[in-house]
Structure formats: C-alpha cells, structure tokens
Image (cartoon, helix red, strand yellow):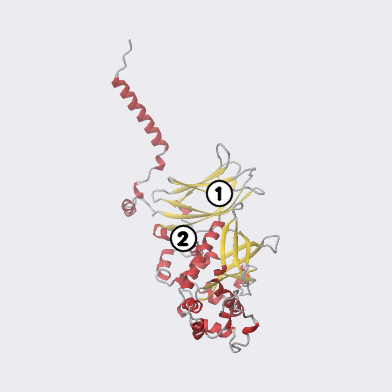
Amino acid sequence: MCIIDPSSIFACATLGCGVLSTAYLASNINKIPHPSECGLIGRLCLMTKIHSHEPLELTIKFKNATSEFGKGNYFIEVVSGRFKYSTDYFKPKNNELVLNVDLPVHLRQCDDHITINLYKHHLMKNKLWGTLKLTLDNILNIPRQRRYTLEGSPPTHIFFSINRFGSDLVEEMESPLKKYALIELQNDGEKDVQGYMSKYLNNSSENKKLRFYSSAVSGELEIMNDLTINYKEFYFKAIELTSGYWVWCYWKNREDYKNKKEEKGYIPIRSISLVKKDRKKNDRFYVRYQDMRGYNQEFFAKSINRDRNSWVDCLNEFIQMARTVFENTDRYQLLKLQLNSDPNAFKKVMGASPRFKLVGLDSGSSEEDYKDENPDFNSDDLYNKIGENSDEEDLKYPDKPEDSQYTSLENNILKSNIKFMESNLYRQI
C-alpha cells in the first residue's frame, strides 16, 4: 500500500511554485520599474554620477524607409527600457515606405540606448524585418534627418531625426501645439530650450505666446478641393492681422513668402469649424470653414514631411487658443456690447462704419445702402484705429525678428483683407 507523505507534497508544490515564479520573473524582468524612476532616488543617482543623463522625452520624426519590400503592411516599434512604442501600418510603394510620423518616446535615466525594430505584419506572428540599436551619443546629436542602416536582410535604410527634451518640459510636451513649436525652436539651433522659455515665454502675454506657437501651424501642404482633381502644393503660415485676429494664409511656395510676395489666398482662423483626420489615409486630413458669404467650404490636405496627426492636433489647439485670446480683447467686448445691448455704443468708439452690422441677417439693408451713410470712412481709417489699440511691445517677438508676424506681412496684404475682416469677423461670434 502506497502512503503519500504530506511533507513531500508540500515540498513538491513549493518547488513547482518557485520554478514558475522564477520563469515568470525572468520573462518579465524588463517590465519591473527601476528604482531610479522614483524622483528622490533618481536625483541621488544623478548627483553621485551613477547615471549620466536625466530622463529624456524624445520625439523621433520618421520620414521614410527603403528596401526590397514585399506586399503587405509594415510598422515600426521602438523599445526603450521597459516601454514599447509602435506606429500605424504602412504599405510600401516602389520599394519605399513613406512614413512622415512623429513617435514620442520616454528614455529613462537608467537606459543608455533605444532599439528601433521594423516589422512586417502577419496574422499569426509579426516578422522582424530589420533592427537598429541607437546609443546615447546618437540620441544626443543635433537633431537633423540622418540615414541609418538596419541590421537584417535585405538591406534596409531608414531616415529619421530625434528631438530630445528634459523632464522639466514634460508639461509642455503634453500639448501638441507647444511641443511642435519647441521642436521647431530646437531645429533652428536653440540648445537651451528651457532657458529660452524662461526668458521670453513664461512671463509673456497670451498674445506673444500665440505668435510663438504659430510656427506649429505653418508649413507645406498639398491641397485638393471640389474645384481640383489633383493635389497641389502650397506653403501655409498663420498671420496675425491685429491683436487676436489671425488668418491662415498660403503662398505658392516658401520662397514666395520669404520674398514678401502677395499670398494666393487666406482663411480666417475663427472661420474654421472642423479639422478632422482622414479615416483611410494616414497622411491626409479634412478642413471645413465658412467663406465671407456664410457658406461652408471644405478641402482635403495632404501632409508633406510631417506627421498628419501633428497637423490636426496643432490646428485644433491653435484655433481654440486664438479664439480665447480674441475674446479677451477690448474689440470683442465692445462688439458684444454693440450686438447685445446698444447698437450705437460700438460706433461711438470705433466710428460709424456701416460694415459692423451683422452680415447675413435680414436687416433690410443692402451693400449699396451703406455707401452714403458715412462717405468719409474708408479701410485706411479702420486700419489706423486698429493700430492705435495695438500693444507696441507685441509688435515684434524678441530673439526672432526675422519671423515677426508684423515685419513679414506687407501693408498691402493687411489693407486688402480689411474688407473681408469687417464683413466676416463679426458674423462668427
């Protein structure tokens, strides 16, 4: 007769649990937080030189990849310590993956490298196409587009740049608009981004901050609307006509803007009602706005050398911020007074311009009725009144005079848009 010893059963169970626990710990050891992720311990490690760098917030701007790609979907995964970050799927065309995606990556202070893996998507298991290990020296380089070769077969080349920011800018990194503006600042050669912000931005007015962040909604886009059958490239830039009033102007190319040529067109920021991602194409988005007659217009935009999601997020945040800034101006408060209580109160301050009536409402008046009401009033007078209410300290943003919205915008562009501003601005409120 076989008698089972209880102590033997307990020993076997303990041994089995120990083996399973060890196996689980070995397979998931990379997922366990490092002690230096605690703030106090992390600072102690930096003070004692155990670690050579502080925690970094990286933005990897992938442009494209070339190889002998087959049919199927591909994606990129970045491994940084115990964290993994993946992109969407991309289809190759002519042995090229057009990526144009910004991937945020957190690098712990205990890590000294990141790994970039390119996978080919399969239903059961993804196939590793190529891999690249980037050391801290590569990460801390000046941010610019570089070509790297992935290990694997066939040979694969990938183009990307890395922007890095310290842990003191984590709050700014949560805002897409602020994040992209700081990336552009770093790309322009500014090494001490935190010092720049402390000197010029932290104690500045919301209007000045908005001018700085306007760089995040400027760049090249390909446009297609119901009047065209193909995408056509333009250079877009947000321009401030007067305090709080912004328009999204576009030129044929960046050179035309730099040479101060007249813009091809413009869209008032306040008239944009929708900016939405395309659900099928990850490089396109949709914009809807109101024209000066009050009709909805729309167009599709295709991103060039920039992440589509960055365009959409920055535009939406900039529009909301511009509206908030404008609604805090004296002009807006006077306008509310005119519209809501006494229609003549606004005229006493700004002049008896007939164009300040609500456009699009049944007022019983026509454009011809306005001509004789105040024959001495013209757009130049309105422009001068606008200038009188502008803060002189806001006319030029410090440290970047070449990008000042006022120095780069010619007076003829301002005057040609005054009529549009009068008729369309006040209907949007």
Task: Name, please, the residue furthest toward the bottom.
Answer: 376
Q: Position of residue 69 (x, y in %)?
A: 63, 44
Q: Residue at x 43, y 49 (%)?
A: 112
Q: Position of residue 212 (x, y in %)?
A: 49, 69
- Disc 2 residue type? Ser
Indicate left or right for 144 with 18 as reference.
right
Q: Is residue 397 above or below residue 35?
A: below
Q: Is residue 399 visible?
A: no
Q: Nearer the viewer, residue 409 or 128?
A: 409
Q: Crowding at label 1, few (<14), some or many (≥20) Cα neighbours within 10 Å?
A: few
Image quarter of residue 217 = bottom right
Q: Is residue 217 above or below residue 357?
A: above
Q: Secondary structure at mark 1?
A: loop
Q: Nearer the viewer, residue 186 or 201?
A: 201
- Disc 1 residue type? Asp
Q: Is residue 247 visible?
A: yes
